[in-house]
Amino acid sequence: MSTVEVRKPGSGESVVSERRILLIEDSAVLTRRLIDLLSEPGRVEVAAQATTQSEAVSRLQQSAFDVLVVDIELAEGNGVAVIRAARQLYPPDAQPLIVVLTNYASDFVRDHCFAAGAITFWIRCATSRY
């Protein structure tokens, strides 16, 4: 996995590895919430965001990420295609962890995501307002 080395404020020379996340989500409100939840300065950074399949694939081609948080239904395209693209673009020894975050709780959707290369499948509450 790729990491960015950053200096921890006030710690002199100690260096920690910061994990880079690509957040692929088309809801602006949910994106802001996820950035707050997923970010931990010096350890985890939401390094880039995408709202469409093509934008996500472009980001994957431009930079390396340690974790992808992927919504299934995007403003254009779908997250399963992004998962497949990520698995093809990254070499075997640099594959990112891929987490699916979706309202679609069916076994079919979950199995489809795992077959494409997702590592885990999170179901968010479909009735929540964001």
Image (cartoon, rainbow, N blue to C red):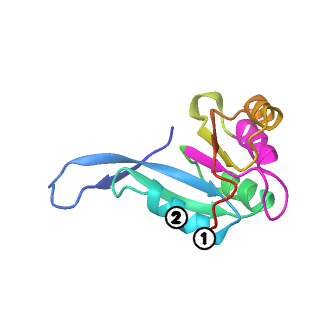
Viewed as shown, does residue 113 lie left or right of 60? right
Viewport quadrant of the C terminus: bottom right
Q: Position of residue 101 (x, y in %)?
A: 65, 48
The residues colored magenta run: 67-89
User: Which of the 4 image quarters holds residue 30?
Assistant: bottom right
User: Which of the 4 image quarters holds residue 51?
Assistant: bottom right
Viewed as shown, does residue 104 lie left or right of 1? right
Viewed as shown, does residue 20 lie left or right of 114? left
Residue at figure coordinates x 37%, y 55% from the top left = 40
22 to 120, vertically: above or below: below
Q: Residues within 10 Å of mark 1 (few under 14, many from 20)?
A: few
Residue at figure coordinates x 68%, y 35% from the top left = 118
Q: Position of residue 67 (x, y in %)?
A: 56, 44
Residue farthest to the front?
127
Give the residue type that dot 1 points to.
Val
SS under mark 1 = helix
Which mark is drawn over residue 33? 2
Magenta stretch holds residue 112 = no
Give the residue type that dot 2 points to.
Arg
Q: Position of residue 11 (x, y in %)?
A: 15, 54
Q: Nearer the viewer, residue 114 or 42?
A: 114
Which mark is drawn over residue 29? 1
Residue at figure coordinates x 59%, y 65% from the top left = 31
Q: Nearer the viewer, residue 55 or 51?
A: 51
SS under mark 2 = helix
Q: Are marks 2 and 1 in contact (CB under 8 Å)?
A: yes
